[in-house]
Image (cartoon, rainbow, N blue to C red):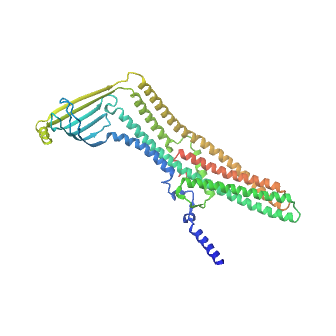
């Protein structure tokens, strides 16, 4: 029985070891420049950004398909075994038809086709009647798209939309990296808060130890001891809350970068003083700018492109209800006889010309198309004005208000630092008084809580400043600052 139990325990141990995933043991250290070490090329967000760009690019390529040169081959063979009802209604069978053509589109309202063909049929009157020839067809738009009047405008719109998509791709990729940086700085702030909370837990443990001794010596009562233990529990609860926050930050980081998988993520060593210098350097640079630095943003370029797109879309809208006037010119040379070879000889020796000119005119006589034109114009204006206004407003707002927000946050941080330093000096004296039974636990806890809140507020204010600066760089992507990636 003992041997059986030993073997069973050994099996459990081996199973536990074999189930360990080596990836779980792999460590990933992330620092301020961790994006240089971790690939984000195939992350869902980057793929979505690429998808948006490729969708716009596809529209231009689909348009260009209309101008490509194509080779076409078409053949028909048909038999008809129906009964002939009378001699004047012959049954034609078999029918053979083969044609090869090259077609080409154009940006100038012009399409062309060059074709060679041969066709043969048999009925009661004719046996193997064969026609062989060459044909050229030309389609010309003589009004709405004359010389590419509308096509060129459509191509301009698509070209500008691709440039807009390229800029948006650049902006969105930069924004994505900044969001990852926000998560990093949130981890740093969380780590600082955890360090602070752990130091306060140690102090609370000392207070519990001191109060316990006093209680055992009948110097302190049971209520004081309960309050010190309550303080310790409260500090540990704060630590648990911070650990939970850290877990959520890491969860977001893993979702955004799936390559991290189940790897253990640790922070590299960082220097708070150096971080503070970088932040102050960036805030000073922003504060020194009086005018909006349009040369440091791509939103200004977006505004200009949207204006060009709107101008061309309005021109397209205006010709929406114009008449359609098209002409097709067909020219053919053929040879006819009662076999393929004879028809080819006839084509060579005595070709017969065939020509057709077909025109079509379509003119609206009711107001439906005019109403549609008016709607197109309104949509184009609204889209253009909205896009330009949003870009301009975003640039102005981010420069004016974020600069002001940073000033307010820095002022708040200075006050918090002064408050923290004062509380720190007071607590040092109060702890000494508490150990000498000259200060009540309630007074000490009140001071420690005030110090704790002041320190946590300072950390959160620092984090808010960094996040605000990163938001600024999401618009002014070219801003020269150590925090701007």
- The one of 243 and 423 positioned closer to us in this rendering: 243
- The one of 21 and 441 positioned closer to us in this rendering: 21
23 sits to left or right of 311: right
Residue 140's image quarter?
Answer: top left
At 26% from the left edge and 28% from the top edge, which residue is drawn? 358
At 41% from the left edge and 28% from the top edge, which residue is drawn? 318
404 sits to left or right of 144: right
419 sits to left or right of 310: right
Question: In the figure, 75 relative to 316: above or below?
Answer: below
- The one of 432 and 464 positioned closer to us in this rendering: 464
- The reply to whether residue 325 is in sight is yes
Which residue of the protein is positioned furthest toward the bottom in this rendering? 3
Residue 100 drawn at (x, y percent): 23, 42
Residue 199 drawn at (x, y percent): 72, 60
Residue 327 drawn at (x, y percent): 27, 29
At 65% from the left edge and 75% from the top edge, which residue is drawn? 5
- The one of 60 and 467 positioned closer to us in this rendering: 60
- Location of the N terminus by quadrant is bottom right
């Amino acid at each position: 029985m003992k041997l059986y139990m030993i073997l069973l325990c050994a099996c459990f141990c081996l199973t536990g070891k074999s189930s360990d995933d080596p990836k779980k043991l792999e460590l990933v250290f992330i620092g301020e420049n961790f994006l240089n070490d971790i690939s984000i090329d195939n992350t869902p967000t980057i793929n979505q950004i690429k998808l948006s760009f490729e969708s716009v690019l596809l529209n231009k390529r689909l348009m260009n398909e209309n101008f490509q040169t194509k080779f076409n081959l078409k053949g028909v063979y048909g038999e008809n075994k129906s009964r002939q009802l009378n001699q004047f209604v012959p049954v034609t069978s078999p029918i053979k038809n083969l044609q090869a053509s090259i077609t080409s589109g154009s940006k100038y309202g012009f399409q062309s086709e060059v074709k060679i063909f041969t066709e043969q049929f048999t009925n009661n009157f004719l046996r193997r009647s064969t026609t062989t020839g060459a044909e050229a067809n030309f389609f010309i738009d003589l009004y709405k798209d004359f010389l590419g009047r509308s096509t060129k405008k459509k191509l301009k719109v698509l070209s500008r939309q691709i440039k807009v998509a390229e800029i948006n791709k650049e902006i969105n990729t930069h924004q994505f990296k900044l969001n990852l940086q926000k998560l990093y700085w949130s981890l740093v702030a969380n780590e600082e808060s955890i360090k602070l909370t752990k130091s306060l837990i140690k102090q609370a443990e000392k207070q519990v130890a001191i109060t316990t001794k006093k209680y055992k010596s009948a110097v302190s009562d049971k209520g004081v001891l309960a309050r010190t233990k309550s303080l310790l529990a409260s500090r540990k609860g704060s630590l648990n809350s911070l650990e939970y926050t850290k877990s959520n930050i890491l969860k977001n980081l893993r979702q955004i970068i799936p390559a991290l998988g189940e790897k253990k993520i640790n922070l590299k060593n960082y220097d708070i003083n150096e971080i503070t210098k970088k932040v102050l350097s960036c805030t000073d640079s922003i504060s020194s700018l009086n005018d909006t630095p349009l040369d440091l943003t791509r939103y200004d370029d977006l505004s200009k492109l949207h204006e060009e797109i709107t101008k061309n879309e309005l021109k397209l809208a205006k010709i929406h209800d114009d008449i359609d006037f098209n002409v097709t010119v067909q020219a053919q040379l053929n040879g006819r006889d009662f076999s393929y070879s004879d028809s080819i000889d006839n084509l060579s020796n005595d070709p017969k010309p065939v020509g057709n000119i077909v025109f079509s005119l379509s003119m609206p006589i009711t107001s439906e198309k005019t109403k549609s034109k008016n709607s197109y114009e309104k949509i184009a204006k609204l889209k253009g004005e909205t896009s330009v206004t949003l870009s301009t407003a975003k640039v102005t707002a981010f420069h004016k208000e974020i600069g002001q927000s940073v000033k307010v946050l820095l002022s708040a941080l200075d006050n918090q630092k002064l408050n923290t330093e004062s509380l720190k000096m007071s607590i040092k004296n109060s702890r000494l008084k508490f150990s000498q039974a000259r200060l009540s636990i309630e007074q000490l806890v009140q001071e420690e809580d005030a110090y704790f809140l002041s320190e946590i507020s300072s950390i959160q204010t620092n984090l808010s400043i960094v996040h605000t600066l990163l938001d600024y760089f999401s618009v002014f992507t070219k801003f020269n600052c150590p925090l701007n990636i």
